[in-house]
Amino acid sequence: MKKILAGALLGLGLVVPAHAQTVNAGTYDVEGTNLDGSTYEGTATIELTSETTCSIEWHTGSTTSSGICMLYGDAFAAGYVLDDAVGLIVYQVKGDGSLEGAWTISGKDGSGTETLTPQ
């Protein structure tokens, strides 16, 4: 029974890998697509607040947004405020330290994409 349960959990992605990825503090180059498919670029700065939590600030064009973030295994998520809306982005941490993800914002349909690459 234990083997079956462990296999089921692993198959569902609920078991954290033994060698989980990490996210480093610092500045990242940002490349993304908006909900309408147009592209944007800029920078993001991550400041670690614990082993699994951080703060993040994006500068894309004339827009600045900030939020909180959390690392769980190879998943990295951030909640943020942009103007009067709340946003959510979920990244996958890659072996080279980059983050690839998808985002959405309250009150809007669909999702955009974003990649953060360490400078």
Image (cartoon, rainbow, N blue to C red):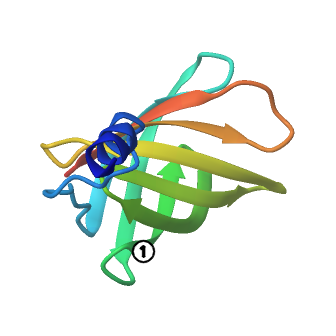
35 above or below 57? above
Category of crowding for the residue at label 1, using alpha-carbon neighbours closer than 10 angstroms: few (below 14), some (14–19), many (at least 20): some
Question: What residue is drawn where x is 61% and y is 59%?
Answer: 79
Please indicate whether residue 57 sits to the left or right of residue 108 in the image: left
Disc 1 secondary structure class: strand
78 above or below 94? below
Q: Residue furthest top?
A: 37
Residue 45 coordinates in the image, percent (x, y): 38, 63
* Displayed quadrant of residue 105: top right
Question: What residue is drawn where x is 47% and y is 31%?
Answer: 32
Label 1 sits on what residue type? Answer: Thr
Q: Depth check: give the residue in front, 3 or 42.
A: 3
103 above or below 69? above
Residue 103 coordinates in the image, percent (x, y): 58, 38
Please indicate whether residue 94 sits to the left or right of residue 68 in the image: left
- Residue 62 shows in the view: no
- Residue 90 shows in the view: yes
Residue 62 coordinates in the image, percent (x, y): 60, 48
Question: What residue is drawn where x is 20% and y is 57%?
Answer: 20
Residue 74 coordinates in the image, percent (x, y): 30, 50
Q: Depth check: give the residue in front, 91 or 32.
A: 91
Q: Residue furthest bottom?
A: 50
Question: What residue is drawn where x is 39% and y is 83%?
Answer: 49
The residue that label 1 is drawn on is: 53
Count of all numbered marks drawn on residues in the image: 1
